[in-house]
Amino acid sequence: MNINSTLRAGKLIASKSLVYIFGVLSLSIMGNAFGLDGTIEIKNVIPPGQPYYSENGYTIKANGDGKCMYGVYNPASYTATYENGIGRVRVHYNASPSHGCSVKRSIQNFDVINNDTGEVTAKFEWSTVLRSCYIVVKEGPANFIVRVKRRHFEPNRLNLDCFLDLM
């Protein structure tokens, strides 16, 4: 092997190392930025004359710190009104293996605000583990928020459900 082939081999090894290091760095950055989307659906079916009826509906607004969360779409809030009855809030949560978030719970707390009074009526926690999502009521009137089972809802109540976008 002559000196030219040795130099060429050295350059090839150096360039492959550089490509490898750059590739690992890129994948690491992409892995930290990877996330999934979920949806919280609110179905407002409280009729006039019932306790907690709100003429202007309710707002769901993120509060507190989330764990393994990147953010909430419509971060200001989403208002569900009686006219259409259904509203959705999109959440974006971390699914990065580098932080263990792909197997840990992603958590975000939300307030339910009565648009007539501006008062926080209830609080709930949205969470997800391994492609399943959960809603847990933290504070609020008994039977005010009901976990919906895939489009079946409780009449005369504020119903919430969660869905994951598995794309």
Image (cartoon, rainbow, N blue to C red):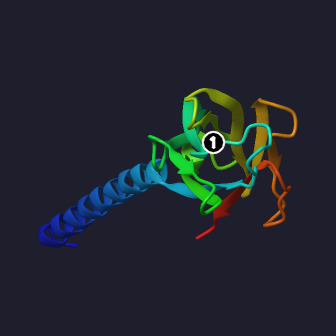
Residue 100 position in % (x across, y down): 63, 42
Relative to 60, say whether 11 is above or below.
Answer: below
Residue for point 36% across, 55% down: 26
Residue 138 position in % (x across, y down): 77, 29
Q: Secondary structure at mark 1?
A: loop
Relative to 166, say whether 79 is above or below.
Answer: above
Residue for point 60% across, 63% down: 84
Q: Nearer the viewer, residue 23 or 158?
A: 158
The quarter in which the C terminus is drawn is bottom right
Residue for point 60% across, 34% down: 67
Amino acid under disc 1: Gly
Q: Is residue 40 left or right of residue 18?
A: right
The quarter in which the N terminus is drawn is bottom left
Q: Nearer the viewer, residue 127 or 25?
A: 127
Relative to 12, say whether 51 is above or below.
Answer: above
Q: Nearer the viewer, residue 45 or 129?
A: 45
Q: Is residue 149 left or right of residue 20?
A: right
Q: Which residue is situated farthest in the left direction here? A: 4
The residue that disc 1 covers is 100
How many other residues sit within 10 Å of disc 1, few (<14), some (14-19) or many (≥20)?
few
Say how many tags the image has.
Answer: 1
Instruction: Note whether residue 105 is visible.
Output: no
Residue for point 83% across, 60% down: 153
Residue 75 position in % (x across, y down): 45, 42
Instruction: Note whether residue 34 is visible.
Output: yes
Residue 145 position in % (x across, y down): 78, 43
